[in-house]
Amino acid sequence: MSWQSILIPGYESGGKPIVSVIAKKTYVFAHGRVKAAEEQVPIYHDEVPADPQNPLGGETLAEPDIVPFKPKTDVVVVGKAHAPRGYRTNCMTCKVFVGPVHKAIRVYGERKVEAKLIRGLSFTEAEPFKTRELGYRHAFGGVAKSKEGFAMPFPPNPLGKGFYLKGGIEDPEEIEVPCCEDPNSPIEPDALVLGKYADWPRAPKPVSFGWTKPSFYPRNSYAGIVPEMLPAQQGKDPKAGKDGRLDFRFYQGASEGMGEHSLEGNEHVKLIYMDPDHKVFEFALPSEKPAIAIGYGKDRTEVPVALHTVLIDKNNNKLSMVWRGCKESEGSEAPWDGGLPMSFVVE
């Protein structure tokens, strides 16, 4: 199967202008097996929302592929928690291993909040389940109501549940309890109602294997202007620091801990409690890489490639891998301005 590919201009993390070729291939997989898909997924120019009717308030299935430069590889897994075949459980820990990338999510059945006779809150026992949804909608977060009635979103995850403010809720039984938690940041009943909004950094961490959104904190704090496009004085004044400059981690859409390594393909994948028939579901990422040559006319030079994105869709057993090959742009002109048009080949 041929690679889906496109040429785009942009900048690398040091601010130098580049031209990048994005090459994408989609595979189908089963336990222990991977092969190229007969129907290739196109290069995405826009976000693919899980709910097209509510793109801002729902999960993201895929981010745009047309990113000229990512510092590391985004590893994203879309799927569900599955109890061992034929059983039900009230709690389990799903895990993802992709080469050096390791992450865990503790998943509970439905729980409610009860007010203690003396003071404080407690959880009811989790109900048994066979399968549970994963994602930011089921992790800690959401939009709290202040005592004045204002909507106050939880910056790291406005999509979730469990975020409340004192005075903004009357009956503890109204509290929605998240079913997904970070094992390193467990959710305690009394942590669901904060004394004041400024306490949100001390709240439990949201957790997911999926995509964040550009509006989530801290990702939104990385947004800015590419250094080469800053005003001249700001770009040269050492006192200006990094204020206003783009931190290229903004383009890393993977969840915390899943975009901190540079993968090369052929990494071993292990998914724990994410398949209805296999407690441990395993396969290896394909080792094939695109050969990318970029230049003017027929005078093209092969460039090194880097793996941008590994998207594992466990719900449909599909795997997409997005690679980048780039070269420094000559001058500030666009790659199609003047002289021979810039061209590329992907094999």
Image: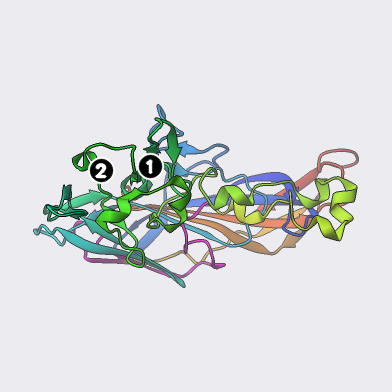
The three-letter code of the residue at mark 2 reads Glu
Identified at 23% across, 50% down, the residue is: 132
Left or right of 2? Residue 87 is: left
Q: Which mark is residue 257?
A: none
Secondary structure beneath label 2:
loop
Q: Which residue is mark 2?
A: 176
Please tell me which of labels 2 and 1 falls first in the chain.
1
Percent position of residue 191, x then y: 32, 55
The three-letter code of the residue at mark 1 reads Gly
What's drawn in magenta, residue-wise? 253-281
Q: Which residue is mark 1?
A: 142
Q: Which residue of the protein is positioned furthest toward the front in this rendering?
A: 118
Question: Is residue 344 in view?
Answer: yes
Left or right of 134? Residue 57 is: right
How was the colour assigned to the protein in this rendering? rainbow
Percent position of residue 265, x then y: 51, 66
Is 129 or 241 nearer to us in this picture? 241
- Whether residue 76 appears in magenta in the rendering, the answer is no
Secondary structure beneath label 1:
loop
Identified at 70% across, 51% down, the residue is: 246
Is 129 or 273 nearer to us in this picture? 129
- 2 and 1 marks in contact (CB < 8 Å): yes
- Whether residue 270 appears in magenta in the rendering, the answer is yes
Left or right of 217? Residue 122 is: left
Identified at 47% across, 38% down, the residue is: 48
Percent position of residue 346, x then y: 65, 53
Q: Give the CA separation, mark 2 to mark 1.
A: 10 Å
Is 299 or 247 nearer to us in this picture? 247
